[in-house]
Image (spheres, helix red, strand yellow):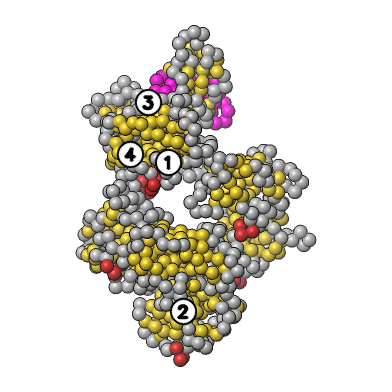
Amino acid sequence: MTKLLKFAVAVLFTCVQIATAAPAILAAEPAAAVKPPGAIAGRVTDDSGNPIAGASAEAFACSDETPSGSAATDKNGEYLIKGMADGCYRLRFSGNDLESSWHGGKQIKDDAADVRVSGEKVQGIDAKLSEAGSVISGTVTGADGAPLSGAWVTVLQTGGIGEEDGGSISDGRTDEKGSFSVRIYPGKCLVVFAKKGYVTRLHGKSAVEPTMVEAAKGKTVSGVNGVLSKGGSISGSITDDRAKPLAGVYVVAYPTERTALPAYARSDAGGKFALEGLATGKYQIAFGDREQKYLLQWHDGKTTPEEATIIAVTAPGAVTGIKGVMRQSGGISGMVTDQNGKAIAEVIVIAEPLERKARGGSAVTDETGSYSIPGLDSASYHLSFRATSSDHLPLYYRDAARKEDAKAVEVTASQTVFGVNQVLQEGLLLTGKVSNTSGEPVQQATVSIYPAKEVDGIPEFASTQPDGGFSAALGEGEYVVEVRAPGYLTQWTGKAATRAEAAPVTVSKKEGVQPLEVVLDRGASISGTVKDRTGAGIARVTVTARDAATGDRGESTTSGEGGKYQIQGLKSGSYRLEADGTDQGYVEAKLPQPVMVTAPGTTENVNLVLSQGGAVSGKVTDPAGAALSMVSVAAYDPATWDEVGSAYSGISGEYNIGGLPEGSYAIRFEKSDSKYPVQWHKGKFRREESARVEVAGTSTVASVDAALQPGVSLTGTVTDTGGSPLANAKIEVYGGNDDEPFADTRTDLRGNFTVSSLAPGSYRVLFSHKGHVSGWYGGSDRRNAARLAIKDAAVAPLSAALAPARGEFSGKLMNPEGKKIGQAWLTAIDALTGVAVTDERICECSGEFHTPVPGGMYQLKVERHGQVTWYGGSVQEEALQLPGTGEISGLEMVIDDKGVRGKLPQRN
């Protein structure tokens, strides 16, 4: 159900970008008959361009969807609708066993192009229709049971959603008996019922919980019925900042409770709009135009949905007098050419704002190489250029290979910055072929090409064709190449298993580029069944193979029908299997014994048995009681503070964490990138103060609700010791005595940051950046860091200057069983003075650490869950001293009751 809801939301929000509901007031009504009536003509063909005879062309008035004329196509696929009064129309096309379509190349009614008639024949209103293959039928009635005629039923076939060719969409209109039939391509379908003045609904349990309809080829699915109730309305006017009415502005009403679907409208020639069919509830209203001439705005005059003034509606009542005043946006335009001045088409140009809150944009160059990016705020932007149909190298404006070296473009709304031109250099083509040991081509393998000397360099990607071939345009230099394909062992250039062992490939104009011949070995596989205690198979369980020696995560898969699974592409070795079925309500399980595999063999009948767990459920809202979606809710074991289970709140604010073992839990609520700080159960901001939730057996503890409270902002700037801003520096905020961060963020390209969600309390702040020594605000380590007192108002901006590092210690922390562990602190102690120079929190997610240090000699201290140990010994006197120059990697540290045992480091 979660996936279905996500799909429904994705479809609806796609419609926001490309469509509005039928406008309540739009364009001119048919004028008085002073001159002869007009006509609409065109041609209907199939996807191959062949004429379709007997297809229907229907015209509907833009203002109220009144049927205004129709005609059938002749043998040449041509039609003529006569007797059309002056006015605005939208044209729908349909045919026997064909999906419907609307003029303008759109399958969605609400995004159809307007056709304006003024006493003459309007020609060239053509359409293409696609094969259907199945039918969905039913009835639409009102809340009183009476049939509703003229209701629109739109069917969205989900098989193609997100694919290159998109998903199939078709619609139909109910007759006087409320009956409809819609022809659609076979597959799983989402059905939407809508009628002017009524609340739009999805077919299913409720307005936002759809039931998918399985449409089979040659079959009719009947009984897909909908019930619509009268809705309320919101109306008003839209002008620019000079009070001039604006036509064609889209207006969207988002219900704060997310229990109803968004509603859409578009302003008419006088700037008037009416949002109809609104369910009783509270709404956030957004205003925007498709051309992005104006900045996106929320009621009233706000820039974000969180700031929007809420409008309450009680159906079928009306809210009037809502005004939207639009401000013109800024823009950037220019041309992209090659070194000979020839235009380059199909280049993606992205404008990325340096300020996090500013709005970015993108465009694609046309055949003249021109582009224009509208809809930009007053801000500074970095522009990136990437060719999609040529071998030109990506660049940042101006002539920069890296974002750090890019020149910013300053935009002031409502002005457009012209002449932002960029010349792209043609790259050198690296080609190759991927095959298996039998000589067969491996298609759809992913080829990742990394700069050999840049550990964090951004790779270029390619994918193999049916013949196994691939190509990628590169600049001169050395690269290492990784090739991945399902069922095969990952391989790096030089037939290496890891990047560290990979042989570099030279790309040079002088020496040329040698084609790569990659032969992939098939990996081993493990297969079996995931079952419950009764022996029944469980689908949709994630099964992961971890290296038994290191604990590294290997390949994974999801169990299918009957609980069957198969993990492929494993190297020879020993693996421990984990099965995560918490989404289905089962406790996570681990196979007690490791599984040995030898590539390319298959180890079969490795079954896992899961037990039903308990659950915690509730609802997350804002202080006013409005639902908050996409809130991460996690259950923690208060003894170890390990996360045991988690879930996200849905569009209704409700969540359910399943698969919990019996025990006591602390529940944590977090909405990322929002004004709300992390909060624990019962409104607490410290985990130690959180009320515990007791889960017994397989029962569900319900009504574990949370009303999130807004936090206080913390701002500042991070630079190096020379005063240059550090982009992408990490800022972590810890409580006065806590070892887990309350919040974290990163700096923008100007080195600025904002943490907008801190609760009142005492905090410490840690700053870090790759290649620089991390530092605490007001101290050298977490113990002597300054405590910031956050109250009800924002504090003065902070500033931090990080020194460049001369050395780095890297490695991983493990338990005696070889599993990577975290929730620990590693501190670098100056061996001469005994003073802490820097420290780093080791995350449970990887167990890895990368600790930059200034020059000197150091001892490494590890603290975890109150235990203090040292690298090379259990006390400081036994600890090894390590030089802080260059990189020392391979520090595989093992922590147990006897201290830290360390593998000898390696110098790089």
- Residue at left 39%, top 23%? 64
Tell which tag, 2 or 3, sits nearer the viewer.
Answer: 2
| Amino acid bearing label 2 | Thr
Bounds of the magenta segment: 42-67
Q: Which mark is residue 173?
A: 3
Q: CA distance from mark 3 to mark 4?
A: 31 Å
Q: Nearer the viewer, mark 4 or mark 1?
A: 1
Callout 4 secondary element: strand
How many angstroms separate mark 1 from mark 2 (CA)?
49 Å
Q: Is residue 503 left or right of residue 306?
A: right
Residue depicted at 45% across the width and 73% down the height: 778
30 w.r.t. 585: above or below: above
Marks 3 and 4, the one that precedes in the sequence? 3
Q: Nearer the viewer, mark 3 or mark 4?
A: 4
Asked which secondary structure carries label 1, the reply is loop
Residue to which mark 1 is pinned: 301
Badge 3, how many Cα within 10 Å: few under 14, some, many 20+?
Answer: many
| Label 4 sits on residue | 311
Q: Does any portion of residue 721 appear in the rendered image?
A: yes
